[in-house]
Amino acid sequence: MATIQYLTTIEFGAGVSTQLPVVLAELGIRRPLWVTDRGIVDAGLLDRVSATLAEPVDRDTVFDATPPNPTEAAVHAAQQRYKAAGCDGIVALGGGSPIDLAKGVALMATHDGPLARWAGMAALGSIGPCAPIVAVPTTAGTGSEVGRGALLCLADGRKLVFVSPHLLPKRALCDPVLTVGMPAAMTAGTGMDALAHCVETYLSPRFNPPADAIALDGAARAWRWLAHAVRHPADLAARAEMMVAGLHGGLAFQKGLGAVHALSHPLGALTAPTLHHGTVNAVLLPHVLRFNAGHVGDKFARLQAAFGLDAGADLADAFTALNLRIGMPASLAAMGVPAAVRGRVVAGALADHSLPTNPRPLDAAALGHLFDSGMQ
Ligand SMILES: [Zn+2]
């Protein structure tokens, strides 16, 4: 017996972000809060997407201070703006960080604080209707535009998940044209997040064949197109393929992720250095694959076939080679992670919601070993 749930309305294709006014009208949103970040504004994407509206955007309805790993403080600051400006919905424009932050704002617009009260899988059933979100992703990787969860860093330093079907954006406008100007390192890092979502979801031992099929297809697309998208940033076909891969990850990962994400969440909660989520995942993936080998049935063979690798190829080595090809850092140490955070990262991973669905059971010693491997 299994309960399997799927998800929201997605508009996909080049130029689809111009449908924003229609979508807002359909949802009855008259004065959205724009949740985005400075990089998106500086890249001209806020102006570009908002130019489709009948009137220019009132700057009082723009929150562009989303941190790379969204924080409780940012949720409260954006929520105050939502309230002060009399907003009735949210347009989340950006990568996973603005979209996750928008979910925090949508939650706190209709629920009383503190934020921590609504954290974790245990709160899933108590979260009621939230402010409506239209997600317009500008990266291809997070999947948050079609996910019911958000990861937010609390003031006490923990990075926790907030999950509810009410947090799912009412619409996702997936326009690959918006990703064309993404720099190579960001294309690579976000693309590896998509790949990590698909691979970890596929390897999760839970029974969910629809999620497995979506994850396997997403992994194959990312494997085929990521390096090409990094090398040929203006190739719209490659951008669209990567956006599908990101979408597939987000559609599938409610099946559960694994050790890569269990470790990357506490690493993402560090305030120094500030780490890019997908890039951390890229570094950890080969080590976690090596650790999980022998606990995944025939799934490595099926991934190898989907990637077009020889049957005898080593999957973990193939991921290391891909990382090298797309310019990912060689280790956590190379990203500036100090060895001193080991205990904190292991403790965070042990408590993380992604841990129970890693195919091979993990304890503190195993997580410490994976951290050490990732550092080298
Ligand atoms: Zn991720």
Image: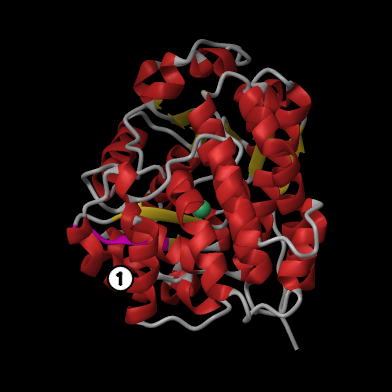
Between 261 and 38, the one nearer to me in the picture: 261
Question: Would you say residue 160 sits in the magenta stretch?
Answer: yes
Q: Is residue 25 visible?
A: no
Tell me where the magenta segment starts and ends, as one range. Answer: 156-161
Q: Position of residue 339 (x, y in %)?
A: 22, 58
- Looking at the rendering, which quadrant does residue 276 occupy? top left
Examine the rendered structure and indicate whether residue 259 appears above or below residue 95: below
Q: Position of residue 143 (x, y in %)?
A: 60, 48
Residue ID at (67%, 29%): 229
Colour scheme shown: secondary structure
Examine the rendered structure and indicate whether residue 180 appears above or below residue 222: above
Examine the rendered structure and indicate whether residue 225 appears above or below residue 114: above
Task: Name the residue furthest bottom.
Answer: 1
Residue ID at (78%, 54%): 309
Quarter occupied by the C terminus: bottom left
> Which residue was labeled with disc 1?
346
Q: Position of residue 205 (x, y in %)?
A: 64, 79
Question: Would you say residue 299 sits in the magenta stretch?
Answer: no
Between 287 and 172, the one nearer to me in the picture: 287
Amino acid type, callout 1: Val
Residue ID at (36%, 52%): 108
Task: Name the residue furthest front.
Answer: 312
Q: Is residue 201 visible?
A: yes
Q: Position of residue 149 (x, y in %)?
A: 51, 58
Q: Is residue 371 left or right of residue 2?
A: left
Q: Helix, strand, or loop for circle 1?
A: helix
Residue count near mark 1 (Cα–Cα under 10 Å), binned few <14, some 14–19, many ≥20 = many
